Amino acid sequence: MLPREHYLKQPFQGHRDLQNPEALTSAQARLIKKHGSLITALLNDDVLNPSLSDMRTVKIITQKSTPTNPVEQAWLKYEALLAEQKPKRRLKRSA
């Protein structure tokens, strides 16, 4: 576990996994790059000293509640875009 400041200093590279990164506004892309490492660490319970704001963000993201700030809005949009690009499994027909 590392302090939250460590994760804030780490740029998030996960936005590069998007097939359609243009779906995010430039502001949303910047927010994800800046806060993505912290959010990922929070979701993995790897942050030593999360703030109340961090815990609220995790609650909103995990419960898919209505976002209350631009970071939460950007992250939920990022997750939605990732979910859209996952291939859907088709059932095989048996003979």
Image (cartoon, helix red, strand yellow):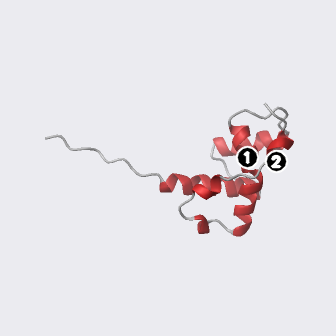
Point out which mark residue 8 bears.
Answer: 2
Callout 2: helix, strand or loop? helix
Q: Is residue 6 left or right of residue 85?
A: right
Q: Give the quadrant of residue 47.
A: top right
Name the residue: 75% across, 58% down. Answer: 31
Name the residue: 82% across, 48% down. Answer: 8
Residue 67 percent location from the top left of the image:
71, 53
**Amino acid bearing label 2:** Leu
Image quadrant for the C terminus?
top left
Q: Is residue 74 left or right of residue 69?
A: left
Q: Give the quadrant of residue 4.
A: top right
Q: Is residue 51 left or right of residue 90?
A: right
Name the residue: 56% across, 57% down. Answer: 81
* Disc 2 from disc 1: Cα separation: 7 Å
**Amino acid bearing label 1:** Ser
Residue 15 percent location from the top left of the image:
64, 56
The foreground one among 70 and 36 is 36
The reply to whether the C-beta atoms of the residues labelled 2 and 1 are less than 8 Å apart is yes
Q: Give the quadrant of residue 48.
A: top right
Mark 2 neighbour density, 10 Å: few (under 14) some (14–19) many (20 or more): some
The foreground one among 9 and 87 is 9
Residue, disc 1: 37
Name the residue: 82% across, 37% down. Answer: 50
Residue 9 percent location from the top left of the image:
83, 49
